[in-house]
């Protein structure tokens, strides 16, 4: 008797978790659903079957979608989707949906005034353990008339037939398999739930008109559909009246393997209901060192969390430490910050400040011209010569007098280096020409040896390294 009484007490407890999800668990006009993403890659889909426990309690992420469900009659494009009875607006984009006892289905999208028809079941209903639901949506059709007609064997249809017309139908097929029930642990609560494996296929089917070449009779024939896998994911749905969206969504391969371990999860129906602890850290701005040897790097953080205030603890090279959220005037190296919230939960992140290579330069004078050779820093480079003439902003100039020439080289990040060169081989006074100097070569302006033609400009190169420019008159 005692065992029988215990069994009657236990049965309601066991059956409570094996839930049904119905249209009562779909969003209504005026509802809000906030969805966050956790891309740490740490989650698994768990196992199918009865009385399972799926743990996503450590999920943390910033809100990615805030779905506010509105009356489509208040939007400008309901006429394009007359069967829509609920909608979502996101900036200039409108999503038109249909809510029914069979679930929530997408009807189409209007993006910046452009209308797209897109039919897809988003949240099927009703759902029970071991259910399989299949939805087929026609995405488009294409009619083709063949002239002249072609033999049917070209389409792998045997027989004495000709094909003169083809109708191609493009379809998407959604399959939902309810393969488990149990409890889902979320960051803010624990829910009774069903696990659903959703697979999306694309298919093409062909309806062809065959004409018998013997009897002359015609008939339409349907060929087998060509199915192609598109994507798969797991969904966890609950019948909790406070939740109007999927608890968790996880992408998988065609076999249901969740190799990435990333999830999107239900974060609540109000900003006030979101719990983020430990905090989430994102980079607001990270600036590397501008010039080699400088200390002008910076790291600025965006920190999201619901347990404020936050305590910051930074450590870096050369004994660096700080308790500020943002740090400045940094030298190159690795910086580590630990952020602890009011709950005592903490997160640690590491960032690297880099510096460009040292900007260096030198001046060479192969003949008359001065040539700057720059390296390091951040190319491209710009050049300013002194003394110089207007337009001397290239790496090469031709000096017009002897003396000290200076070139200032600036890279892309405005790092600067300066080099000098003493020019001594420019002939500026004919009285300084020593005719007794021995010539090494006579060349023209393109470097060819030349004995002299009337009117030509020649360069006389002497053994002492000097060069003279002369015009050959006779």
Image (tube, helix red, strand yellow):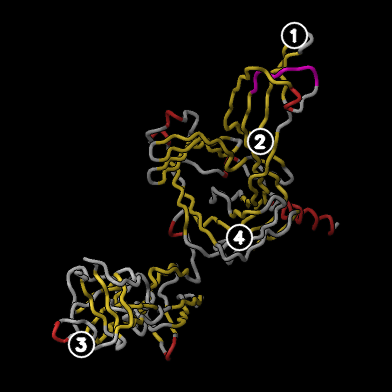
Compared with 190, 336 (above or below) is: below
* Residue drawn at 64 percent across, 43 percent down: 200
Q: Left or right: where does residue 308 sit relative to residue 37? A: left
Circle 3 SS class: loop
Give the distance between the C-alpha atoms of the residues marked 2 and 1, in whole angstroms: 32 Å
> Which of the two marks, 1 or 4, is nearer to us in this view?
1
Query: Could you classify mark 4 by the number of other residues whose Cα lies within 10 Å: few (under 14), some (14-19), or many (20 or more)?
Result: some
Q: Which mark is residue 190?
A: 4
In the rendering, at what x and y percent does residue 451 appear? 30, 72
Q: Report the span colored magenta.
A: 159-166
Looking at the image, the residue that sits furthest to the bottom is: 319
Counting every numbered tag in the picture gives: 4
User: Element type at marker 1?
Assistant: loop
Can the viewer see residue 84?
yes
**Viewer-side residue, 194 vs 380:** 380
Q: Principal SS element in the magenta part?
A: strand
Q: Determine the CA span between mark 4 and mark 2.
A: 39 Å
Quadrant where the image shows the C terminus: bottom left
**Which residue in the protein does label 2 denote?**
203
């Amino acid at each position: 008797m005692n065992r029988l009484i215990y069994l009657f007490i236990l049965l309601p407890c066991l059956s409570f978790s094996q839930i049904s999800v119905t249209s009562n668990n779909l969003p209504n006009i005026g509802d809000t659903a906030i969805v966050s993403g956790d891309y740490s890659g740490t989650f698994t889909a768990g196992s199918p079957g009865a009385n399972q426990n799926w743990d996503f309690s450590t999920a943390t992420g910033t809100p990615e979608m805030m779905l506010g469900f509105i009356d489509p009659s208040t939007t400008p494009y309901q006429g394009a989707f007359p069967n829509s009875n609920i909608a979502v607006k996101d900036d200039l984009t409108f999503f038109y949906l249909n809510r029914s006892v069979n679930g929530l289905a997408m009807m189409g999208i209007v993006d910046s005034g452009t209308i797209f028809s897109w039919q897809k079941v988003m949240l099927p209903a009703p759902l029970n353990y071991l259910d399989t639901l299949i939805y087929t949506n026609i995405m488009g059709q294409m009619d083709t008339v063949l002239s002249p007609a072609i033999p049917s064997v070209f389409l792998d249809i045997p027989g004495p037939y000709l094909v003169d017309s083809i109708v191609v139908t493009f379809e998407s097929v959604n399959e939902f398999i309810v393969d488990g029930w149990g409890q889902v642990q979320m960051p803010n609560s624990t829910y009774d739930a069903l696990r659903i494996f959703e697979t999306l296929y694309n298919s093409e089917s062909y309806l062809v008109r065959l004409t018998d070449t013997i009897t002359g009779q015609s008939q339409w024939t349907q060929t087998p559909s060509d199915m192609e896998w598109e994507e798969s994911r797991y969904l966890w749905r609950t019948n909790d009246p406070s939740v109007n969206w999927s608890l968790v969504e996880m992408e998988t391969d065609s076999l249901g393997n969740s190799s990435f371990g990333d999830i999107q999860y239900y974060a609540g129906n109000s900003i006030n209901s979101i719990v983020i602890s430990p905090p989430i850290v994102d980079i607001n701005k990270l600036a590397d060192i501008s010039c080699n040897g400088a200390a002008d790097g910076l790291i600025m953080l965006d920190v999201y969390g619901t347990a404020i205030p936050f305590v910051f603890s930074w450590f870096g090279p050369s004994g660096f430490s700080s308790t500020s959220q943002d740090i400045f005037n940094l030298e190159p190296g690795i910086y580590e910050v630990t952020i602890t919230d009011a709950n005592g939960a903490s997160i640690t992140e590491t960032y690297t400040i880099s510096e460009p290579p040292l900007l260096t330069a030198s001046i060479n004078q192969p003949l008359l011209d001065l040539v700057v050779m720059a390296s390091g820093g951040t190319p491209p480079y710009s050049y300013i010569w002194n003394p110089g003439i207007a337009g001397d902003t290239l790496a090469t100039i031709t000096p017009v007098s002897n003396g000290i020439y200076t070139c200032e080289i600036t890279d892309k990040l405005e790092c600067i280096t300066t080099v000098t060169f003493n020019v001594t081989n420019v002939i500026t006074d004919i009285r300084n020409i020593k005719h007794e100097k021995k010539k090494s070569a006579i060349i023209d302006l393109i470097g060819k040896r030349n004995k002299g033609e009337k009117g030509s400009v020649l360069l006389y190169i002497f053994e002492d390294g000097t060069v003279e420019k002369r015009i050959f008159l006779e």
